[in-house]
Amino acid sequence: MGRNHKDLRPFIGVLKSLQGGNGYNEYVRPQILLSQQELISESPYEMAFLITCQVGELYVGAVCHEVRLAQHHLQHDDVYTATHTLRRAIAIFKAMNASYEITRGMQPQEWIPIKQNLGRGRSSSVHSFMFRALMFLLGKKSEKSLEPLANTPEIYSELQQMLHAPSLYDDVLSLLNRRGFAIPDTSIISSFHFTNESIPEVEDSWVRVYSGSETYLDLRDLAEVMMDLAQEYETWQHLHLMLTRRTHGQKLAYYKEPASSWLEQNATIRLFPELWSARTKM
């Protein structure tokens, strides 16, 4: 893109061909990062919106990394390190949620020109494969959610594997099983947690974790970090819903359903359902 009113950042004309540089520039690669914005509309909000989306994808990737690392530690019964790792994921979520402040003031007339040119008006955030990966890692799974990515075979294939692989919550429940709790067999543990329906045995196990016994202090800390992670995820969904309401209203979205209503329904499904429902029994 040439130098015009759309892009007023310094150095943008030379960044695409910039080579070399000191250690910092070689490590962070700003010449690559700052050359990845191709504006497609006349909206004055587009630069901020596009960079917010790109940073969001980087944040989501970082959370995926931390969640997978936590799963590795859980599989090796290292609860302390897994808990510490998930605290990093929560911090990343907080930063990602704060980034929504940038788009808070975007009005419909500033969003519509972007939307109209985004995949000829047919593209949507549901095409974010990193977001799908994060959902699956956190246990929020459905076959239908893969439909928007069917035309990208390599990504679709890896997501299919993730869809049927253990989630973070599956690994936590497997840990409880190894610690002597009455968790159902693996066919139940590995099922899709895409409802708010609680499994009674799992619910009772969390009640026992919170019973006050010092034997379960590490599990209680892990459970509280899981709750914090779920809460930040729900905050993220809520902020996305608020942005959609303000810019998109109830226009039909990718699934041919009113955008805000579809997001509202999706937001009612909580991560780690028994951790929430067990509170009633404590």
Image: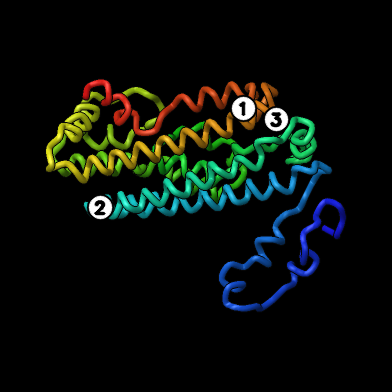
The x and y percentages for residue 71 are: 33, 50
Q: What residue type is labelled 1?
A: Tyr
Q: Choose top left, top right, bottom left or bottom right for residue 8.
A: bottom right
Secondary element at image label 3: helix
Residue in front for this viewpoint, 207 or 156: 207
Left or right for 179, reference 117: left
Is the residue 47 above or below the residue 135 in the image? below
Report how far apart the C-alphas of labels 3 and 1 lie in the structure: 18 Å
Q: Circle 2 sits on which residue? A: 80
Q: Where is residue 172 in the image (x, y as percent from the top left)?
A: 27, 42
Q: What element carries label 1?
A: loop
| Nearest the eye: 248 or 45 | 45
**What x and y, as percent, mark residue 83?**
30, 49
Side (left or right) of 277 relative to 65: left
Determine which quarter of the picture holds residue 76: bottom left
Q: How many numbered circles are shown?
A: 3
Q: Name the residue under label 1.
A: 255
In terms of secondary structure, where does tag 2 sit?
A: helix
Residue 113's label in the rendered image is none
- Residue 139 is at least partly visible in this image: yes
Q: How crowded is mark 2: few (under 14 residues within 10 Å), some or many (20 or more)?
A: some
Question: Whole-Å distance between the Cαs marked 3 and 2?
Answer: 43 Å
If you read the primary sequence from the N terminus, does the residue marked by circle 3 or circle 1 appear first? 3
Which residue has dot 3 on it? 247
